[in-house]
Amino acid sequence: MEDEVKLMKGNEAIAHAAIRYGADGYFGYPITPQSEIMETLMDEKPWETTGMVVLQAESEVSAINMVYGGAACGKRVMTSSSSPGISLKQEGISYMAGAELPALIVNVMRGGPGLGTIQPSQADYFQTVKGGGHGDYRLITLAPASVQEMADHVALGFDLAFKYNNPAMILADGVIGQMMEKVILPEQKPRKTEEEIRKEQPWATLGKTHGRKPNIITSLELDPAVMEQNNIRFQQKYNQIEENEVIYEELLCDDAEYLIVAFGSTARISQTTVELARKEGIKVGLFRPITLWPFPKKKLKAYSEKVKGILTVELNAGQMVEDVKLAVECKIPVNFYGRLGGIVPTPDEVLDELKKLL
């Protein structure tokens, strides 16, 4: 397949990009507002064209453990869900991080806590960026702000997961999952053969072949001294990711006296706010973290020497704002504006909050 330009939802773009990336398997369970990912995969029937397995598991817990098994075999496997479903997957995600297994997880966020609402939210920032499950682990976390990025982040997420043998997550909000935009789909990539997997992922367990014993994939270690060394190795890997894989976008930041920091759909809204503010003579720029972890703290720290204040905009009660405050080390004021319950702010509302910094 050559590049194609299509109009589709963000969720649909995830599914098409996964097929074209050459993913080996998808295991999921329906929940609004991300159900179109699995529905699109079922409609496309990739098992007939690429051999990709698509399975609706009996629960979110089953789905993440199927991903664990596929990842242990070196396969390119993924799952998707929305906020309460991701909560159910947390134990399996922690196990995979402890076993150092690559996989792609998609969270199209809805409002909470609890069952909450099916409306959009960004309230899973803490759950993902701060770990979510038990233990000292990190998830590589990508925050798309367009349907195109929903598609592009599939390949990026898989590539980073396999580069560092660590689960990666696409953390999108319901707005991005449900909105429709033009998207350019990539060419079809072939799935990796078992021989390629053995060569590239010698740790993978592929059963007893040629008299060799299978590798044992586990996150369990009963010797505390060994477990400590494992954790030290994990932290060294996370430090390497923080050093090498930070991604962000800047809009009109060169001469900015103030910054808006936002991700996902709130970044799109804030972009219009920047345009409105500039028309009023307010020199403001937009800083959009694309990797929520690793968070672009060094770049924001540098801006703390240049700008007079920062406004963070989120669809939650204030989560990313904590990382922004840590990054600037209290050198400048950092204000927060958020809406809850699935209510999306307007650019004018954000502008009114920005003016409180002036």
Image: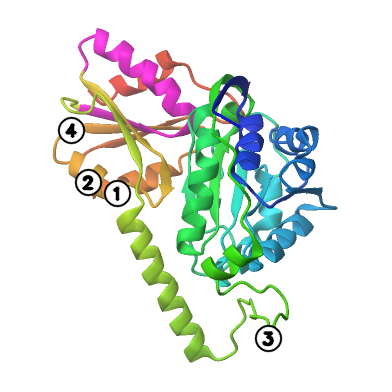
Q: Which quadrant of the structure image shows residue 261?
A: top left
Residue of label 4: 307
Question: Is 124 in front, or is 142?
Answer: 142
The disc placed on residue 213 is: 3
Residue 166 shows in the view:
yes
| Disc number lying in front (4 or 1) | 1
The residues tagged by marks 4 and 1 sit, at their Cα atoms, a distance apart of: 15 Å
Quarter of the image with the C terminus is top left
Residue of label 2: 301
The residues tagged by marks 1 and 2 sit, at their Cα atoms, a distance apart of: 6 Å
Quarter of the image with the N terminus is top right
The residues tagged by marks 2 and 4 sit, at their Cα atoms, a distance apart of: 10 Å
Q: Residues within 10 Å of mark 4 (few under 14, many from 20)?
A: many
Seen in the image, is 159 located left or right of residue 14? left
* First to last magenta residue range: 258-282
Q: How crowded is mark 2: few (under 14 residues within 10 Å), some or many (20 or more)?
A: some
Q: Which secondary structure dominates the residues rendered in magenta?
A: helix
Amino acid on which disc 2 is placed: Lys
Dot 2 or dot 3: first in sequence order is 3
Amino acid on which disc 1 is placed: Lys
Residue 216 lies, in percent from the top left, at 65, 80
